[in-house]
């Protein structure tokens, strides 16, 4: 790399404080034209904050931004747009009831009052082809999968001629296949001379997507490197400040009585089509039962049926031998079932409540936290402090509203609450999504120790390595059916891969 060229973007000495935290502390960042910079750091390190400063959502307390060597005044996202900067946020900002085309047009100031829809559509289709971003312009946003919605967000920015694309954990919500496609989009962008800043917690993606990498810790830059000159292990160490175990120690399982049993369960998906077909399996106390499969093959529906959030149309669900088919979520919670949901922002946490209230939410009706009808705030606070420490939730205080935490720390709050509330069965749906490597390690350990404490754990993951490492048995889900069930000690990973793609002898039986 030639250091004499003027960087496309230079952030100098950026600081930004929030009540109780210094989110960015004298940060310098350089991005060159045609370069992809990966931004790494633990949950709460200040990555989203730094990027929100760059795209005009936050005003820094101190520091300057230079674009093409010239001082830039960025006071709003619109200013940022003028400089060619566009951001896809950790949580999308599309309007659900509108269609793709309308979302693209929304907020375009230089379009005529009645936009020429045909012209917009033609350009959109051209861009979609050029960048391999396949979407139907007439589809309503609510009909699209998260992956498709993300493509719309990216198209929206490209339509506005973005030269610098900021992607805040874009792959946390994508299937491995979709992540691969996103990588292709980024490559086309580079070829066109565009640049990108890419936030991720996945080391393989840093290696695959980026040219340069920068690590933040507690708001400060702690390391920078050319991607080709570093390793995932080294990056993880720089992030966390210690060696990270990619392997979890685990004793052989000691399965006991059946805690959860599904017999011939069927259910419909959101669009009224069959999503689960003849699902039968038993989960025992003291074992981790993994569900493998490409997302969208019935995982979400299966988790929802088991937790009472979705009706089954056929079959039987038993918890500890008791018929619980189509019982309410509350009745199921009362049987000691806890649930880390897939969609944690809309169903998992209550943003306006404090961290402590969110942590205590599931426990304050039962013994240790409530005496009669009177809540005991001191106990809630003690519980909260213990969980904050155990799960390394970074928050200014237990009284801070959850909406002010970083994305990953909101997730840790839900995880801590659910793991604390489980008595018989733990349903964990993609529990390590959006978590940094250290937190991922903690979660995996917790699942294993829950198992060793005698719970049955139903564990959903898209990461086959993780799944085989943590689970004792694995079922492969494809198009709503269980293709086969394996013992993880004897399994052949290629065979699982084949079944996940719908190939194998069991097909159609
Ligand atoms: N609007 C806000 N109000 C108050 N505090 C905030 C706000 N936004 C961020 N913070 C705090 O600033 C710190 C950095 O948060 P940020 O969202 O930048 O982290 P992050 O590196 O993106 O983490 P993650 O990987 O979890 O998304 C956190 O302690 C967070 O609680
Ligand atoms: Mg973030």
Image (spheres, rainbow, N blue to C red):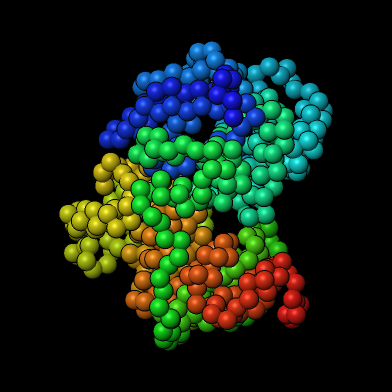
Question: In terms of image quadrants, where is residue 313?
Answer: bottom right
Q: Is residue 215 above or below residue 328?
A: above
Quadrant of the frame with the N terminus: top right
Q: Is residue 372 above or below residue 439?
A: below
Quadrant of the frame with the C terminus: bottom right
Is 345 on the left-hand or right-hand side of 2?
left
- Where is residue 295 shown, x and y percent of the image? 63, 60
Specify the farthest residue to the top: 70
Q: Is residue 54 above or below residue 332?
A: above
- Where is residue 475 shown, x and y percent of the image? 59, 75
Is 58 on the left-hand or right-hand side of 383?
right
Q: Nearer the viewer, residue 390 or 438?
A: 438
- Where is residue 87 shown, x and y percent of the image? 57, 32
Q: Nearer the viewer, residue 434 or 1?
A: 1
Which residue corresponds to the image point at 46% horizontal and 36% vertical from the top-left? 224
Q: Nearer the viewer, residue 76 or 276?
A: 76
Count how many numbered circles sit on residues in the image: 0
Which residue corresponds to the image point at 37% horizontal and 31% vertical from the top-left? 24
Is 465 on the left-hand or right-hand side of 115?
left
**Res. 144 visible in picture:** no
**Res. 284 visible in picture:** yes
Which residue corresponds to the image point at 33% horizontal and 56% vertical from the top-left? 391
Is 312 on the left-hand or right-hand side of 371?
right
Which residue corresponds to the image point at 73% horizontal and 80% vertical from the top-left? 506
- Where is residue 133 shown, x and y percent of the image? 73, 41
């Amino acid at each position: 790399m030639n250091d004499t060229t003027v960087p496309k973007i230079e952030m100098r000495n950026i600081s930004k404080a929030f009540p109780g935290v210094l989110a960015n502390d004298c940060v310098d960042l350089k991005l060159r034209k045609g370069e992809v910079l990966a931004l790494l750091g633990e949950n709460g390190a200040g990555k989203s904050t730094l990027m929100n400063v760059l795209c005009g959502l936050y005003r820094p307390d101190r520091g300057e931004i230079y674009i093409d060597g010239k001082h830039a005044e960025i006071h709003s996202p619109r200013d940022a747009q003028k400089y060619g900067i566009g951001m896809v946020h950790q949580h999308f900002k599309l309007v659900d009831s509108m269609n793709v085309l309308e979302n693209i047009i929304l907020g375009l100031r230089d379009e005529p009052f009645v936009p020429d829809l045909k012209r917009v559509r033609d350009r959109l289709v051209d861009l979609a082809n050029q960048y391999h971003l396949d979407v139907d312009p007439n589809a309503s946003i609510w009909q699209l999968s998260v992956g498709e919605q993300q493509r719309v967000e990216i198209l929206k920015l490209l339509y506005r001629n973005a030269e610098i694309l900021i992607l805040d954990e874009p792959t946390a919500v994508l299937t491995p296949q979709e992540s691969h496609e996103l990588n292709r989009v980024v490559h086309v962008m580079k070829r066109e001379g565009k640049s990108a800043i890419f936030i991720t917690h996945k080391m393989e993606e840093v290696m695959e997507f980026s040219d340069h990498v920068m690590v933040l810790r507690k708001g400060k830059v702690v390391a920078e490197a050319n991607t080709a000159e570093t390793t995932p292990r080294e990056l993880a160490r720089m992030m966390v400040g210690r060696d990270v175990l990619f392997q979890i120690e685990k004793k052989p399982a000691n399965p006991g009585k059946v805690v959860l049993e599904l017999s011939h369960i069927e259910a419909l998906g959101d669009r009224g089509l069959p999503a689960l077909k003849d699902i039968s399996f038993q989960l025992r106390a003291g074992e981790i039962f993994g569900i493998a499969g490409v997302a969208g093959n019935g995982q979400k529906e299966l988790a929802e049926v088991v937790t009472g959030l979705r009706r089954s149309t056929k079959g039987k669900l038993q918890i500890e031998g008791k018929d619980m088919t189509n019982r309410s979520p509350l009745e199921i919670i009362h049987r000691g079932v806890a649930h880390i949901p897939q969609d944690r922002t809309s169903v998992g946490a209550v943003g306006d409540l404090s961290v402590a209230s969110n942590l205590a939410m599931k426990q304050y009706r039962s013994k240790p936290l409530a005496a009669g009808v009177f809540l005991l705030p001191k106990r809630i606070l003690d519980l909260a402090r213990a969980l904050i420490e155990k799960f390394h939730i970074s928050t200014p205080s237990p009284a801070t509203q959850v909406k002010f935490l970083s994305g990953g720390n909101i997730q840790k709050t839900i995880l801590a609450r659910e793991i604390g509330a489980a008595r018989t069965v733990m349903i964990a749906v993609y529990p390590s999504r959006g978590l940094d490597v250290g937190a991922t390690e903690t979660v995996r350990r917790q699942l294993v120790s829950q198992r060793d404490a005698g719970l049955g754990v139903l564990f959903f993951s898209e990461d086959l390595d993780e799944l085989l490492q943590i689970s004792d048995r694995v079922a492969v889900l494809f198009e709503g059916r269980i293709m086969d069930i394996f013992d993880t000690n004897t399994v052949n990973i290629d065979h699982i891969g084949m079944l996940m793609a719908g190939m194998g002898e069991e097909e159609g039986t």
